[in-house]
Amino acid sequence: MKLYVGNLNYNMDEDSLRDVFTPYGEVESVKLIIDRDTGRSRGFGFVEMPNKNEALSAMDELAQKEIEGRALVVNEARPQVRH
């Protein structure tokens, strides 16, 4: 299950984001979205967890949880639309 994670602290890296989700289960992949002009995080990313129940648990527990001074937004990711 792929989760959208928003309102991230701009200093957070992919390893830190993985560490937030691993207590809830196996994390398959983590992808922070980086601004191509500045090279800095855009404050959101995606976490993939192979076990749907673990992903749902992480989503419930982490939504609105304060991490590094920011209240996280965690939702099921919408399918990517290609143009």
Image: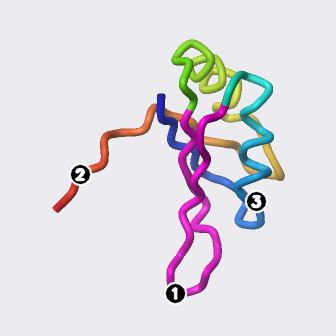
Q: Amino acid at mark 1?
A: Asp
Q: Secondary structure at mark 2?
A: loop
- Determine if the magenta segment contains residue 25: no
> Which mark is first along the chain, 2 or 1?
1
Counting from the top left corner in percent of width and height, residue 33 is at: 54, 63
Q: Position of residue 18 (x, y in %)?
A: 73, 43
Please state the extent of the stretch shown in magenta in the rendering.
27-48
Residue 52: x and y in percent read 52, 17
Disc 2: CA contacts within 10 A as few (<14), some (14-19) or many (>=20):
few
Q: Which residue is mark 3?
A: 12
Q: Main secondary structure of the magenta part?
A: strand
> Residue at position x 58%, y 41% from top?
47
Residue found at the very far top of the displayed protein: 53
In the image shown, does 74 or 34 lie closer to the viewer?
Answer: 34
Question: Which amino acid, mark 3?
Answer: Met
Cα–Cα gap, marks 1 and 2: 23 Å
Which badge, 2 or 3, comes first in the chain's sequence? 3
Q: CA distance from mark 2 to mark 3?
A: 26 Å
Instruction: Find residue 81 and name its label.
Output: 2
- Mark 3 neighbour class, 10 Å CA radius: few under 14, some 14 to 19, many 20 or more: some
What is the number of the mark on residue 37? 1
Q: Residue furthest left?
A: 83
The answer to whether the residues at label 3 and label 1 have Cβ atoms under 8 Å apart is no
